[in-house]
Image: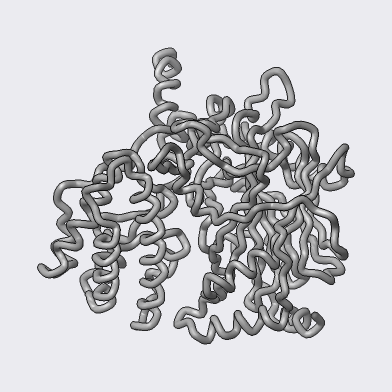
Amino acid sequence: MMRLLTLLPFLLVAACTSLPEPIPDAIPAQQQIYTQSQAGCVDLLTDFKRTVQQQGVQDAQLVWDPRFPHLAFDRFSLSWLFELTGRDSKRQWLDYVSHQAAVQRQAEYQNLPDNSAYAFNQLEQCAAQLVSQSLYQPALWSVLIAEPPQPVSGYSSWQRVLGLYPLTQHLARPSVDKEKRRLISHFIQPVEGDAIRYAPDDKSSLNRSQIQAWFRQARARSALSWPQLSAGQQQRLLNHYAPVIQVETRSRDDFPGQVKYVTASQPAVVSRKPTLYTHVSYTRFYGQTLTQLNYSLWFANRTARSGFDPYAGRFDGVLIRLTLDADGQPYILDSIHHCGCYHMVFALSPTLRFAATDNKEEWPVTLQVYAGQQTDKLGVTLSAGEHMVKDVQWLRHDVRTRSLTVLPYERLRSLPAAPSQNKSLFNPQGMLPASVRAERFYLWPLGVKSPGTQRQLGHHATAFIGKRHFDEAFLFETFFKRPEERAGRQQRDGL
């Protein structure tokens, strides 16, 4: 036991810094999938990724698999693999995963300390050529189905084995339940002290009928009934539904800011320019694919509540996600901190009913916020210091706000760090090393990798007891019963 305790700090460091598996020199599946004429492009894209990995700038937001060097995957796209039965559905799926790969490739190209060996246009042309031919390659689809790419888990099995997880999960449950009760108690407490409201300046001219028409048209064009809107439509929706965020403000730690590299190796949150980072995602909910509007705030620090606070430290932030129903109306709001902690789920529609709690797994805080909805504008209040969500309500009139600059979340994957050099905020494991917390030294038996560390999309483990990721494709089917179609029609008719 003493030997294990001696090795423990080194094991924890290894868990936080273990690199993605190196890309092998030979990849037999590529020879099985691609023709001789495609080999040049396959080799170029694979060699580029190998260089990216060797130089330590691999983007971890998406799953990249060397068998498919022109594609990149998230949990949502991987959930569809066994349902792509026709050519049109495969084409739409390919468009999605190839676009993700293009965004990832651009970030990695910009972040390479030396990218002179590659011409970006040539990389893009090769990727486009492989994508256009993939639809007609049965071997590619056979390999995809037989051995699908695997997302990286936010959990470490060896930590749970060494930490005697079957026992420690029961020891941890009282603390987990106590923390949930504390979070819920915030919702009956008034706003304390000074509070500042923030919102983007852009005023929306959208109305509900226009949004509903967009979603009807998008579904009609989709072989998979995905409401895939244009980039312009997505941005207008993000602006239209952006919540007013009220922050209790006691110190400089409570001013949201913009993430920048202040030196070539030191990222920081600069509070002079409050910024909201946005992106669009999708979820699957009882036969429907729903659009999700994501809003991220970053703070310089989480304030210490005492002389030793294991949860305090550099960087803090909240991700607020608004899921729209099939007609593009507010349906579910949920949030986490950027560490994946403190998952809260709010039902915004009376057609939604929470499922019975599963005592075998940790459950998020669940609340209903739909009484008397007469507006599309939500107000979200964050507490001072900890930046916990302590109130969600519909705003019935305009309020005075400070301006938020709106930037795409993708910016965080490639930030200017030095003259002619960009860096991701996150390392190749999807972590922000500058934000590590002392809590990781005693929460490690529960298996979450580096608890408390701020992390990139795709890496948010949200439960200490059980396993759950924020971006799981069927996440809300765990929390909600199947909505009644009749109730949904009544609600829409009454709007």
Image check: 13 left or right of 236?
Answer: left
Q: Residue at x 73, y 78 (%)?
A: 207
In the depicted view, which residue is nearer to us: 364 or 414? 414
Q: Residue at x 73, y 34 (%)?
A: 385
* Residue 245 drawn at (x, y percent): 75, 52
Image check: 442 left or right of 7?
Answer: right
* Residue 194 drawn at (x, y percent): 86, 39
* Residue 231 drawn at (x, y percent): 53, 70
In the depicted view, which residue is nearer to us: 185 or 277? 277
Residue 446 visible in rendering: yes
* Residue 98 drawn at (x, y percent): 36, 66
Q: How is the image coloured?
A: one colour
Q: Residue at x 37, y 49 (%)?
A: 110
- Residue sitting at the far front: 419
- Quadrant where the N terminus sits is top left
- Residue sitting at the far left: 36
- Number of numbered discs: 0
- Quadrant where the C terminus sits is bottom right
Quadrant of residue 140 in the image?
bottom left
Image check: 363 left or right of 414?
Answer: right
Quadrant of residue 200 in the image?
bottom right
Q: Residue at x 77, y 61 (%)?
A: 378
Residue 155 visible in rendering: no
